[in-house]
Amino acid sequence: MSRPESELKPIRTLFRSLAVATRVVSVAPAIRAQEASMPAAGDGLVADAPVFRAVQPPGAYLRAIEAGTRSADGRPGPNYWTQRVDYAIDVELEPSTAHIAGSETITIHNNSPNPLPVLALRLYQNVFSEGVERNRTVQLTGGMELQRIAVDGTELSETTRQTFNRDGGYLMLGTLVAIRPPEPLAAGAQLELQVDWSFVVSGGGGFRNGHLDNEVFNVAQWYPQVAVYDDVFGLDMEPYLGDGEFYVDYGDFNVNIRVPEQWVVVGTGTLMNPDAVLRPEQVEALASAPALDTLVHLVTAEDIAGGSVTRSSDDGWHTWRFQADNVRDFAFAASNKYAWDATGAETGSERGRALIQGVYDPEVTTWAHAAPMGKKAIEFFSDYLYPYPYPSATVAYGPPQVNGMEYPMITFINRRDDPGSLNGVTTHELSHFWVPMIVGTKENAYAWMDEGFTTFNTALALDAYYSGDPSRSPGRTGSMGGYLRAAQAEMEVPIMWHTDFAPNGFGRSIAAYSKPGMLMHTLRHMLGEETFDAAYRDYIATWAYKHPLPWDFFAMMEEAAGTDLDWYWQSWYYETVTLDQAVESVIDVDGGVEVTVSNNRGGVMPVELHLDLANGTTVVDVWPASIWAGTRQVSRFVPARGQLRRVRIDPDSWYPDIDRTNNDWVRPGA
């Protein structure tokens, strides 16, 4: 990457790279081949051949390195900071009208070195308002109505663009509201915002949250939320359009949710008053569940039919109280049709085992597997990525429009009648509990940093779950197949594009999910599993509860690789070049063969040759990606003892070759 000369490695020129790089890519020990000397690139550069350009981070990122909030090695700098935001929320859900009314107190801690004259709140529900810009089709609900905004008890008035800077108050900006308090929030200080609001939960025309026949509610993006102020880009005022997701600071939540009796509520965090809403035997079962590897049934179909889901109350309503510490968001699900199962999961964290819950319509029998599937996923990711630090994880059944959507400690998933489908979505969504719930990426801009990583994580988890059975787990081949379809149809958009700017949904999906997921498998193969896994875990632990950016990840992986990987990031993350390697010729020479390989397109990857000999052995020879600088055809000597029968390029499909029909050479008559 291009970096400040005083702190970062100097950018190598193309010619210096060719002169010194004899092995730009590290490879796993299982595929290490006998080294051959670097061939000459030719008498001159080929005009249309790949040229390795350095990654250029934005100036704001480079200034953050100079300020000491970021470091050249991709880690937080000595002066790194994040804001902290705590929420106390009281909310009532009236199911028959789908109306939600809430009141919240927000405590903003300014940990930055700068005074903040302007703050902002995100009003996600306004994406359902008439006249608001969005990139998804919605059912109009009127959005969120603000009844009151106050700063430290002083009520603010709505203002206009013309008077906002002069008079202060608050300014409505679609899915945002800008707030100018009476005095700037000083560095190191805190203030309280009081906000009263209400909205109607969208029915069938919503997305990510909604309700099913006023009986099953998945509630998210539901409260005014403080917009991030970070060390690189400052105040995040990007509007919520629908496709892009979220960028959120961490804090503590205390949330009181009032619903009718006989309704189950599950949400982010820990239920603090089970005695007030549940029957004694339910309270006992809930408390015992984390220590168990078997399933306990807190609410059954018989309980629903018999009206014994919860305690009775004097006024017909209950308030469910939840507490969640050091999380970036809060969501909840509520229903009078929920069966409720619970078990426990080993996490390896200091907190100990976690409560795993599944809530669902008991008529959808597949969902009886939801909690056990969640348990498997939490245990796998705790072992592979980072010990799960939170007390619970819940898989909640929801309306069709939620599809699969993740929030801290809870995920919403629509009806899945096939166990494999339910397991795949559950595992994917629970992987999000690590990225972006623990590692707080700016997913609205860099969707690949949560969706791509999660696609990769899910493939590994499902491979483990199904013992590597390819008929049940798509593994890495699923990501590869999705990417190749988009590349062959020329519908790609660059991974590094802002997700809201993708011109079509297919291209956006590939750029966020399939392609970056595939590239993680490719990078793991190039570096070797042990090196990659250690670096990936280091990245997760280093950026837990912080806000990494792409260039932090790039730098940390380069540090692990021990080499510059700009050729990889630039061509595969910033561009939409494709790869087509082909065996052009194989010539017998003393002690081996001379193999000529062409690179028919603009993308570059190492060349991984498998030479099958007549004696049944296979020689694997890996050529570094640096050979392609300035040329489209390379010949190299490959030592081989025995008669050669066949040469194959990447037969295990680790690299995204768009045309594999030219990857094999077979000796005539072999």
Image: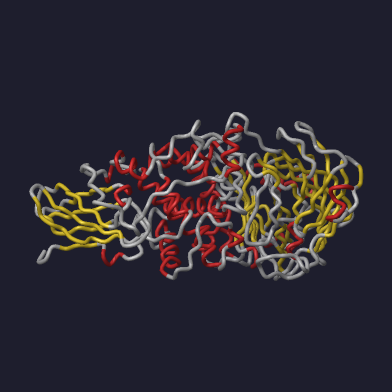
- Residue at 79% in and 32% down: 189
Rendering colour mode = secondary structure
**Of residues 272 and 6, which is closer to you in this image?**
6
Q: Identify the residue shown where x is 89% and y is 52%.
A: 148
Q: Between residues 226 and 288, which one lies in front from this camera angle? A: 226
Of the 4 image quadrants, the one containing the C terminus is bottom left
Residue 284 visible from this viewpoint: no
Which quadrant holds residue 597?
bottom left
Above-or-below relation of 26 to 659: above
Q: Residue furthest left?
A: 590
**Residue 71: x, y in percent?**
54, 34
The residue lying toward the viewer, choosing from 589 and 279, is 589
How many marks the image carries: the answer is: 0
Q: Position of residue 575 (x, y in %)?
A: 46, 57
Q: Is residue 33 visible?
A: yes
Q: Is residue 428 left or right of residue 606?
A: right
Instruction: Give the residue at the far top of this rendering.
Output: 78
Q: Identify the residue at horizontal 81%, vertical 61% (top origin).
A: 199
Horizontal relation, residue 33 to residue 67: left or right: left
Residue 228: image location, x then y, percent: 70, 45
User: With respect to residue 242, does 277 lie above or below?
Assistant: above
Closest to the observer: 603 or 129? 603
Q: Is residue 380 left or right of residue 646?
A: right
> Residue 649: horizontal and vertical position, in percent?
26, 57
Q: Among all residues in the image, which is located at the extreme front? A: 44
Quadrant hosting residue 323: top right
| Residue 33 as seen in the image, left or right of residue 403 | left
